[in-house]
Image: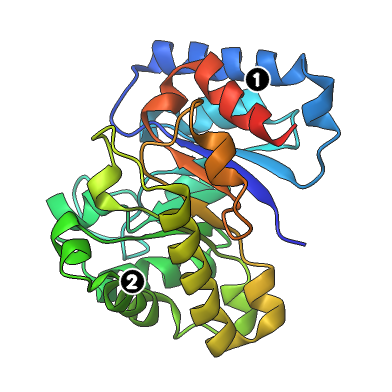
Amino acid sequence: MRKNIVAGNWKMNKTFSEGSELVKEIINLLNNNDKIKLKDQLHIIIAPPFILLQKSAELVKDNKQVSIAAQNCYTEEKGAYTGEISIAMIKSTGADYVIIGHSERRAYFKETNDMLAKKVDVALKNQLLPIFCCGESLEIRQAKNHFEWIKKQIHESLFHLNENDFKKLIIAYEPIWAIGTGITATSQQAQEIHAYIRSLIKEKYGDDIAENTTILYGGSCNPGNAKELFANPDVDGGLIGGASLKANDFIQIINTYL
């Protein structure tokens, strides 16, 4: 049975002290909610900036429902790549996950499907679990090319994997036109794309893997719309941006599953 996951992507926000306090606040709220502890299928992931990975991993280590993710990694394992962060460095902090292919990385840093395939490979090789992002721009959706666009992203970055490796992935669908804009895909739009992604996985890897792959929605998800979005049969949780920067908002989204 696939997990329900609520993941918070802080992006380039919070200093070391601010971020440490936010993680502490989230953990305190989680620890004081006995209903969350009883939800075996519910998992929480926090993706702070790199400077907070080790501290965050230390703060959550006693809560088995919470893991830490990096927001990005480099394609190479080591070498003369000034300013980049390797998978081994991330792994050494105590993080378990890494976000790969976020729309902002694709748009601002020109990351290609081939480059993201290399990141997925290096992550899996070093026992870090990828949260792979896919999604379309407003122009692509308006041209009604969004299905083919998402199919291309997934085929070129993920479908070279064998079954055992693919089973380790989390996929996050991001309608780029809904990120940070306050516009949210309707519940029906989210379900349609999630079901389509699952159908692609089924076609490639079969029913069992398709039904056990967690697919998250990422696009202006907040306490006001999370319940409706998460009620869809193929939406297994959210990759949360701005709402994850406030502990109470993040917990309200998590509480959707209680």
Question: How far apart, in angstroms, are the residues tagged by discs 1 and 2?
Answer: 35 Å
Q: Residues within 10 Å of mark 2 (few under 14, many from 20)?
A: many
Query: Which kind of residue does numbered mark 2 sit on?
Result: Ile
Determine the residue positioned at 59% across, 36% down. Answer: 227
Which residue is more in the foreground, 187 or 257? 187
Residue 132 lies, with reference to residue 56, above or below; the image says below
Q: Nearer the viewer, mark 1 or mark 2?
A: 2
Please name the residue that numbered disc 2 is placed on. 150
Residue tagged 1: 27
Of 161 and 153, the residue lying toward us? 153
**Occupied quadrant, residue 36:** top right
Quarter of the image for residue 159 reads: bottom left
**40 sits left or right of 104 in the view:** right
Q: Is residue 83 left or right of residue 257?
A: left
Q: Residue at x 47, y 73 (%)?
A: 196
Residue 226 location in percent, x, y? 53, 35
Q: Does residue 99 appear to the left or right of 80 in the view shown?
A: right
From the image, which quarter does the C terminus lie in? top right
Label 1's element?
helix
Residue 118 against residue 79 in the figure, above or below: below
Q: Position of residue 95 (x, y in %)?
A: 55, 43
Q: Quadrant of the N terminus?
A: bottom right
Dot 1 or dot 2, earlier in sequence? 1
Q: Position of residue 68 (x, y in %)?
A: 55, 38
Is residue 111 visible in the rendered image? The answer is: no
Three-letter code, disc 1: Ile
SS for dot 2: helix
